[in-house]
């Protein structure tokens, strides 16, 4: 009651002082506060356009963010903030190169992918979490990395012929693989446009050439078939025409015979009625018959000419059809021979060439191995001979050092070789017949078997004399050529 009376008292006090009413001032203040409060609330009430998503974050009681599309919401100051995600589609160029297919063939698939931020409830949350605040270029880069990886994975599960022949199946697999991954970051796959499919080995080009060749061959076969059908139809129509002409001629002849019969009946009646006009009637009748015969001959000639023309056309059509059939059979036989003989022959030739090359490489390797083995064996034998010679040289050097002179060392070496010399002499006379050997012994001193060796050595030319004859000087340790001493019984007389 007191509070309700205060404005009245204040108003009366103001009125008693002669100033403006206090109530009016308070009303104006209150109105201004209401207006300011309304403007503030109006600014915080955000409407979302149809091409955007309103993302309210902060204290929302709806998870990490609250996403609104096509509506409005009040954004509380201080505890909440907002931002927008654009829904405009963007094109991601995918320059996919050297992707491995199921056969390990590298494929190049230039593609354009159209995507946009999704408006589905769960996917919008992913977009608000992962894309809010990013630029369009950053969003496109993320999408491009995901699309490249998924397309490589899809191509790795398909063969080249499947990718090239069934583009719809390839697109379906790409859509399934890419759309699922894009939804994880809040994007929607709108369209996939594959511009071309190429491979560095030229396999797709070869497939295209094969398909084009098959299409051309099939078109040629269809053209030949249609030509044959057309010519067969022409021949059938000519045959029908001939039959119709023959039937018409038969009907004409029957009609002519009937007309002739009626004419003769009427003529006979007229002859009976008008005997006076018989001569004139006979003349007219003869002229009519003559004209009739001429017309019949002309019709018959035209019929025979048409029949002969039809027969000729039929034979020509048959000849052309048989020629085309023979050419088709020849082409088919050539293709069969190409597939059954030429291709296997080429394959056998390649096998023979490969086998010959392999045999050649094998022979070269064997020859190289034998050469290396021979070289190693000869090297080992040379080393062995060198070792033997080095050992002999060292032994001879020690023998000379052990002996008092070179003559003594030479004598020792000769004594060492006496056994081998005796063996060679024994081999030289072992095959001689013993009964052909005669030994003369005079029984004198120094004669007999005891002096046989001395006599044999005396019968040989002296070694030094023989060496001098050929220009050699033997060393002194091999003995000196002394004067021949005469026996006592052959001393000269005094």
Image (spheres, rainbow, N blue to C red):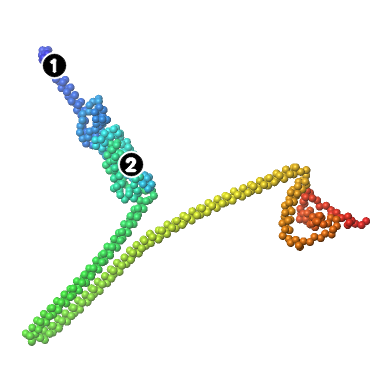
Find residue 402 and report its image quarter: top right
Q: Residue at x 29, y 67 (%)?
A: 321
Q: Earlier in the sequence, mark 1 or mark 2?
A: 1
Q: Position of residue 385 (x, y in %)?
A: 65, 48
Q: Position of residue 314 (x, y in %)?
A: 26, 70
Q: How many marks?
A: 2
Q: CA distance from mark 1 to mark 2?
A: 76 Å
Find residue 351 and report its image quarter: bottom left
Binning the other alpha carbons within 10 Å of mark 2 as few (below 14), some (14 to 19) or many (20 upward) gives many
Q: Is residue 163 left or right of residue 248?
A: right
In the picture, the quarter occupied by the C terminus is: bottom right
Say the numbered circle drawn on residue 12: none
Viewer-closest of 115 and 392: 392
Q: Is residue 403 left or right of residue 390?
A: right
Q: Position of residue 191 (x, y in %)?
A: 27, 43
Which structural element holds mark 1? helix
In the picture, the quarter occupied by the N terminus is: top left
Q: Residue at x 26, y 37 (%)?
A: 118
Say the numbered circle drawn on residue 150: 2
Q: Residue at x 15, y 83 (%)?
A: 286
Viewer-closest of 122 and 201: 122
Q: Residue at x 32, y 59 (%)?
A: 217
- Looking at this view, name the residue that lies furthest to the left: 273
Q: Is residue 193 visible?
A: no
Residue on which the image places disc 1:
22
Q: Position of residue 329 (x, y in %)?
A: 33, 64
């Amino acid at each position: 009651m007191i509070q309700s009376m205060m404005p009245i008292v204040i108003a009366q006090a103001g009125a008693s002082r002669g100033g403006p009413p206090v109530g009016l001032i308070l009303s104006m203040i209150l109105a201004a506060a209401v207006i300011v409060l309304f403007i503030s609330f109006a600014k915080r009430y955000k409407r979302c356009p149809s091409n955007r998503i309103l993302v309210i974050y902060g204290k929302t009681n709806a998870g990490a963010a609250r996403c609104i599309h096509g509506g409005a919401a009040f954004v509380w100051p201080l505890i909440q903030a907002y931002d927008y995600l654009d829904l405009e589609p963007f094109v991601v160029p995918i320059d996919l190169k050297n992707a491995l297919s199921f056969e390990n063939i590298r494929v190049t698939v230039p593609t354009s992918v159209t995507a946009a931020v999704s408006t589905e409830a769960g996917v919008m949350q992913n977009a608000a979490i992962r894309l809010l605040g990013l630029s369009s270029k950053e969003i496109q880069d993320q999408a491009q990395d995901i699309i490249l990886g998924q397309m490589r994975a899809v191509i790795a599960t398909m063969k080249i012929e499947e990718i090239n022949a069934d583009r719809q199946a390839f697109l379906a697999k790409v859509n399934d693989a890419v759309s699922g991954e894009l939804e994880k970051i809040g994007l929607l796959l709108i369209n996939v446009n594959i511009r071309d499919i190429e491979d560095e080995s030229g396999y797709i080009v070869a497939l295209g050439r094969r398909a084009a060749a098959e299409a051309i061959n099939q078109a040629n076969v269809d053209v030949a078939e249609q030509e044959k059908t057309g010519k067969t139809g022409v021949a059938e129509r000519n045959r029908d025409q001939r039959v119709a002409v023959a039937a018409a001629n038969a009907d004409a002849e029957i009609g002519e015979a009937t007309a002739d019969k009626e004419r003769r009946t009427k003529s006979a009646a007229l002859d009976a009625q008008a005997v006076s006009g018989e001569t004139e009637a006979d003349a007219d009748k003869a002229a009519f018959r003559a004209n009739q015969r001429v017309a019949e001959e002309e019709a018959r000639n035209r019929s025979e000419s048409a029949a002969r023309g039809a027969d000729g056309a039929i034979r020509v059509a048959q000849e052309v059809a048989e020629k085309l059939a023979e050419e088709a059979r020849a082409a088919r036989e050539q293709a069969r021979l190409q597939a059954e003989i030429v291709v296997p022959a080429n394959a056998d030739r390649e096998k023979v060439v490969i086998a010959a090359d392999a045999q050649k490489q094998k022979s070269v390797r064997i020859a190289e191995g034998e050469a290396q083995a021979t070289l190693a064996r000869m090297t080992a034998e040379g080393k062995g001979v060198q070792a033997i010679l080095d050992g002999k040289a060292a032994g001879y050097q020690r023998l000379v050092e052990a002996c008092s002179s070179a003559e003594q060392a030479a004598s020792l070496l000769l004594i060492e070789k006496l056994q081998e010399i005796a063996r060679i002499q024994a081999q030289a006379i072992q095959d001689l017949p013993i009964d052909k050997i005669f030994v003369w012994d005079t029984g004198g001193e120094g004669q007999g078997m005891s002096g046989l060796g001395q006599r044999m050595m005396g019968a040989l030319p002296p070694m030094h004399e023989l060496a001098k004859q050929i220009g050699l000087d033997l060393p002194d340790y091999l003995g000196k050529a002394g004067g021949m001493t005469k026996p006592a019984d052959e001393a000269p007389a005094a």
